[in-house]
Amino acid sequence: MTEQSQFRSIPSVDAVVREMETMDAAIPKKLAVTSSQAEISMLRQMVAEGGQAKSARRVAEAGLRRARKILEMSPRQVVNATGVILHTNLGRAPLSEEAVRAVAYASSGYSDLEYDLSKGARGSRFADIDAVVQAVVGTEAALVVNNNAAAVFLALDAHARGQEVLVARGESVEIGGGFRIPEILEASGARLRDVGTANKTRVEDYSSAITERTAAILRVHQSNFTQIGFTGAPSRQELAELAHQHELLFIDDLGSGSLIDSSIYGLAREPLVTEAVAAGADVVTFSGDKLLGGPQSGLLVGSADAIKLIAKRPFARALRPDKMTITALHATLLAYLRGDAPATIPVWQMISAEESTLKDRAMRVSAGVDDVRIVPSISTVGGGALPGEMMPSVSVQLGESYGSVEEVSRRLRCASRPIITRVRDESVCLDMRTVLPQDEQLITEVLCGL
Ligand SMILES: *Cc1c(COP(=O)(O)O)cnc(C)c1O
């Protein structure tokens, strides 16, 4: 057949849609149309490159696969067997049961989100959440925004637009996902003034860089790397004192920050939000979905004056959180207020899980499964918290009889709830620290069916 006749035998959208509808009567018409259009346009491209035309039925099959993928829930639930607790690609912190209930409760009907029930008039969406943040952290004021990147941006926008901000060279970092300190500064209209050297910064480096154009000192947590050897930076207190002597603002971007001392669990110490506040920072920013274990959000805490100015900026309105975020964060913070966060917030349940618990889980998961071994492994916190910190963990390792590592990983990703694994020593491993209790049975079933 000539190329022209190949083109002529490309089926029409109508024909493909009809085929799709006979194969699956439940497929929404709109979706059948757009899916068949997409498949036909791909087919045209293939024919233009010398390929063969396909029948309406073949195109409809591909269209149906495309349509069904669109009809799936998104994002889909997956099993995190990577051992990385705050896996940014896997949605960071899973919410506590209480936070999940709170989201369903607040979003399934109307709510008093911006309504003051005692006055019968307009209220603030932040009134309750601010009070809880203040109670947990002990600051005068708080503000919740879309994420920590927004929090840092807003602090700079409100306090340093058109002025200079001092940042240590070793803290002018990239966090990943497009968050680079110099770029955030530029976007906020502030000018970056680098101080010190890549590995060492002294108080004098900051003080000698202060001019009448300086508005603030910004300290940034080195979230995803560690420096060893000849290093050093001034303490938070020293920077706060210096800033205040010169009537500058001291902004402390903690990244993850923590409300629980991670050293209790044998880890290094992630800076505590309360410590950063006590050291004298005017504004402390941190994420809601890192070690806090809540929804994606950014928290700003600090002095009433500094926070109020930020809250009044137009960008604060543009970056405000929705009711589902506010209620999930509220429920998460209540756990800290009551003191039961380690027992009820998944991130802390995983951090605090004992090796014996993980071993029990590995035994349950692998019961009746052929060719698996229970092996020691290492899990990490991830998500820009506690870089380089390793937690001894327990993994289920699949033997060679399962086939190549790529093929086994792919088949596990195709499970009804996809299982995301890690490859160690050239074999597929399922780290039990990040596996949730409700995942256990599914894993066993999938492994038995491999
Ligand atoms: C993670 C991180 C951010 C960005 O926080 P998001 O909540 O992801 O926007 C900013 N600064 C530091 C130091 C971080 O670790």
Image (cartoon, rainbow, N blue to C red):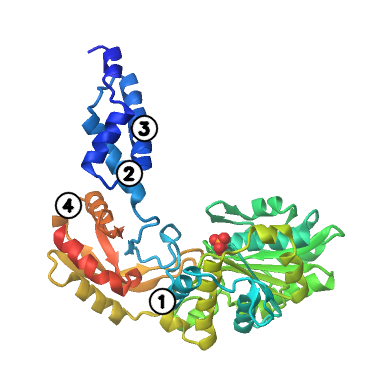
Which image quadrant: the N terminus?
Answer: top left
Which is closer to the viewer, label 4 or label 3?
A: 3
Question: Disc 4 versus disc 3: distance between alpha carbons?
Answer: 38 Å
Q: Which residue is mark 3?
A: 37
What secondary structure is found at the residue carrying circle 1? helix
Name the residue rendered at 39%, 65% in the picture.
Answer: 84
Mark drawn on residue 67: 2
The disc, 1 or 4, on the residue closer to the chain's N-terminal end is 1
Position above or below: 72 against 107: above
The image shows residue 294 at horizontal and vertical percentages of 50, 71
Task: Name which residue type carries label 2.
Answer: Ala
| Disc 2 to disc 1: CB gap under 8 Å | no
What secondary structure is found at the residue carrying circle 3? helix
The image shows residue 145 at horizontal and vertical percentages of 62, 65
The disc, 2 or 3, on the residue closer to the chain's N-terminal end is 3
- Within 10 Å of disc 2 (Cα), the crowding (few <14, some 14-19, many 20+) is many
Q: Nearer the viewer, residue 35 or 316?
A: 35
Which image quadrant: the C terminus?
Answer: bottom left
Q: Which residue is mark 1?
A: 97
Task: Answer yes or no: disc 2 within 8 Å of ligand 1.
Answer: no
Q: Which residue is mark 4?
A: 403
The image shows residue 104 at horizontal and vertical percentages of 45, 71
Name the residue rendered at 31%, 26% in the picture.
Answer: 12
Which is closer to the viewer, label 4 or label 2?
A: 2
Question: Disc 3 versus disc 1: distance between alpha carbons?
Answer: 42 Å
| Disc 2 to disc 3: CB gap under 8 Å | no
Question: Disc 1 versus disc 4: distance between alpha carbons?
Answer: 38 Å
Name the residue rendered at 36%, 28% in the picture.
Answer: 41
The disc, 4 or 2, on the residue closer to the chain's N-terminal end is 2
The disc, 4 or 3, on the residue closer to the chain's N-terminal end is 3
